[in-house]
Image (cartoon, rainbow, N blue to C red):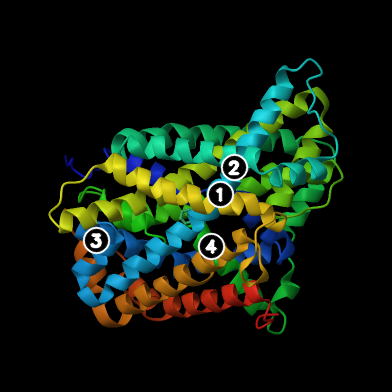
Amino acid sequence: MSESKGQFNSNIGFIMASVGSAVGLGNLWGFPYKMGTNGGFAFLLLYLILAVFVGASVMLAEFVIGRGTGKGPVEAFREIGQQYTFLGYFAVAASICVLSFYCCLGGYTIKYWTANLIAIFTHSGIFAVSDTATYFMDFVGSGLPAVVCTAVFIIINLVIVLGGVSGGIEKFTTIAMPALFVMLVIVIIKGLTLDGSSGGLLFMYKPHWEVFAGTGWVGVLASAGGQMFFSLSLGMAVMITYGSYLSKKESLVSNTVIVTICDTLVALMAGLAVFPAVFAMGFEPASGPGLLFITLQSVFNTMGAIGPIFGFLLYFLVFIAAITSSISLLEGQTSTLIDAKIRKGQPYNRTALAAIMSLVTLVTNTITTIDGLGTGPLPQPLGMCWLDFFDLLGEGILMPLGSLIVVALVGWVWKIDFIDKEVSIEGNQLHAKGFWNFCFKITAPLGMAMILLGQIDGFFGLGIFS
Ligand code: PHE
């Protein structure tokens, strides 16, 4: 039996889903730390410039490709021209790679919010373990318990996607995103009112203009660019897919601007939620899993009986941010399979197709989870842990390479009219056409090339940008 592919009921639903995709682990554990260690306010300035001159055009192009064709990534590119189909495969492959570690991390968040929730109700009201580093590494290396958390995350992901575009994704994100915002504000207020929190503000915001000295700015630009790109969920079949579910009435340019601004705001808020508390409690700033699962849990442990309440709030918030990102990845993959069936004139069953992709995800995430950030028994590809390996393939290579080709095509081959034609319908207009043209021709291809080099440099430690 075939059902229709679905549509967002409202523009606000589309925005919530897209912002939900953009706001994820990248905002919460990547951005604040990178900002703090890469020039503070100076990093923020470069980040914003890149978002305006590179990120926004890639996002607009993806919305145009999706809504213009009404299809998921592979068939959308095929419709534009058979020879471009590979770009769709690039995006879907990148999406599979990123989802291959995202659910493992999502599983960690489940472990932590449940552990803090339990601590609220146990009579001491305090998190059971004081050595948070050992607690984390024990869990990461625990094998089955960690895989169970990963599997639960994958099942929740699947259940939401099975609800469909408007009934599942739109409904869930329309409730989850405002809830996430409220939780974030509560955690920020708590953090800022702790004694000594100003150290965290200084860490993040104090400008270090010296990062611009010599060729230093190129390295910061590359790091800000990689962060921006991942954070905006670009090059991963997500914005094309969500664009294909958007009504022709809505303005693609306004939506691009809104999603970019919201994502950046939440990244800044995440820093306010995390670092003031870290500094107030006398901990060293860190990034990635260490920041989230070790440093922050230590912070909550020092808060006494209210610690688990804030621990639960924060980890639940991170879980929500992760799940609204992972559903967008699964939806992009599912819509690709649905399109393939439609093209062949075969009937399709959304449930079965989403379940197939979830099984793939379960297999790859089991590998990532058992590898336990490189501590497990599995042989390691290229001498890196499996999480880094999937990240290298997806975020490091496929995502920026595909998008570099897309923006260069828009700028030089399809030309700005390709964008204009889809934007300027039903009374909408492509304002500032000259600006967009300039971005697609010059700044976006240059920026994407730099991001690609920066990613490869970062993964292999080549030192090109240092
Ligand atoms: N933007 C998400 C984050 O910041 C990650 C993501 C990338 C989600 C690509 C979907 C597609 O964590």
Asked whether 142 or 24 is in front, the reply is 142
Q: Which residue is mark 2?
A: 147
Q: Label 3's element?
A: helix
Outermost top residue: 123
Mark 3 or mark 1: which comes first in sequence? 1
Mark-to-mark CA distance, 2 and 3: 44 Å
- Looking at the picture, how far across and down is residue 393, in whole percent? 52, 68
Residue 294 relative to residue 44: left or right: right
Q: Which residue is mark 3?
A: 423
Mark-to-mark CA distance, 4 and 3: 24 Å
Q: Which mark is residue 228?
A: 4
Mark-to-mark CA distance, 1 and 2: 6 Å
Mark-to-mark CA distance, 3 and 1: 42 Å
Residue 97 relative to residue 455: left or right: left
Q: Amino acid at mark 3?
A: Val
Q: Residue at x 60, y 73 (%)?
A: 221
Q: Kindly report which numbered mark, 4 or 3, lies closer to the viewer in this rendering.
A: 4
Q: Residue at x 71, y 66 (%)?
A: 39
Q: Residue at x 25, y 49 (%)?
A: 250
Q: Is mark 1 within 8 Å of ligand 1?
A: no
Task: Residue 306: tell me if it is visible.
Answer: yes
Mark-to-mark CA distance, 4 and 2: 30 Å
Q: Which residue is mark 1?
A: 366
- Tags 1 and 2 touching, CB below 8 Å: yes
Mark 4 or mark 3: which comes first in sequence? 4
Q: Kindly report which numbered mark, 3 or 1, lies closer to the viewer in this rendering.
A: 1
